Image (tube, rainbow, N blue to C red):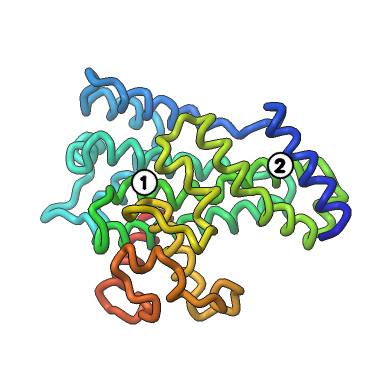
Amino acid sequence: MSKLADKVQQELIQAIDNDELVLPTLPEVALRVRETAEDPNASIQDLTKVIGNDAALTARIIKVVNSPLLRTNKEITDLQMAISRLGINYTSNLATGLAMEQMFQATSDVVDRKMREVWNKSTEIAGICHVLCRHYTRLMPDQATLAGLVHQIGILPILTYAEEHNELLADSISLNHVIERIHPLVGDHILRAWEFPEPIAAVPSQYLDFGRNSARPDYIDIVQVATLQSYLGSEHPYTQLDWSQVPAFAKLGLDPNVDMQADEDLSAAMEAAMSMLQ
């Protein structure tokens, strides 16, 4: 690993340890949505008010509720009906995840492109998570989707740091090294600072541990399998791994040699899940 990558990695890890790393803050609307959803006395009307102030988020939630995955007999055009249909928790997780898209923007072109790339990959993996969760587990699809949307959140502060350090920005190999090595650690740190529930907060640091084997299927397994599936047909190093040695597949009851894309129903569901998030 280059001297530069080493130096940056040490600086960032030290900043985390000393609580000096400037962590991204959840968008205001996401904070308010979560606060409302966690209030036992809050009603669907209360949540409608909070989300209704954000026109873009309102449109996204109505789009999701009408997507082929969740479609009802008649089209839903009204936010309150959409929230009634999805439920408060589902809406809250979805709104939190979707509101985060606005965090993946930067002032410099290079960083902005990279952030968009990360967000697009996250929505692709979140779509696959949604489908895996619904078809192969009894876990909550909204939480699986949120886990997919946040699993690379640790990349954000590293890119923000790069934006202020030209030598790192100019050296994309070192930058990618730093991202690969420490985004999992930074990601956990951010999600705990945001007080995400532990089963999701642990995703960034553990989803790349392909030998991991817990007692029962969890969101880490789902993100792990979704990540591997997302690289099928590419030259990515993950496609060179022996997937039959990855316990997450067996835990979900999935044959590691089967390409989910080849199953028409699953493939259509994944397409629908990805497009509802984009």
Q: Quadrant of the N terminus?
A: bottom right
Q: Residue at x 47, y 58 (%)?
A: 212
Q: Residue at x 57, y 40 (%)?
A: 103
Lower position in the chain sequence, tag 2 or tag 1: 1
Q: Residue 153's spot in the image, x, y percent?
A: 56, 45
Q: Against 195, is 64 above or below?
A: below
- Whether tag 2 and tag 1 are in contact, CB under 8 A, the answer is no
* Disc 2: CA contacts within 10 A as few (<14), some (14-19) or many (>=20): many
- Label 2 SS: helix
* Quarter of the image that includes the C terminus: bottom left
| Corner quadrant of residue 188 | top right
> Which residue is situated farthest in the left direction here?
73
Viewer-nearest residue: 201 or 47: 201
Residue at position x 46%, y 60% from top?
224
Please name the residue shown 62% across and 51% down the image: 115
Residue wearing tag 1: 60
What amino acid is at disc 2?
Thr
Q: Position of residue 237 (x, y in %)?
A: 61, 74
SS at mark 1 in the image: helix
As drawn, which residue projects farthest toward the top?
41
Kindly identify the amino acid type of the residue bearing the numbered disc 1.
Arg
Dot in front, 2 or 1: 2
- Up-down: is 199 above or below 110? above
Q: Which mark is residue 160?
A: 2
Q: Which is more toward the observer, 219 or 263?
A: 219
Where residue 99 sits in the image (x, y, percent)?
A: 45, 39
Kindly report the distance in space between the C-alpha atoms of the residues bearing marks 2 and 1.
27 Å
Mark 1 Cα within 10 Å, few/some/many (few <14, many 20+)? some
Q: Quadrant of residue 266?
A: bottom left
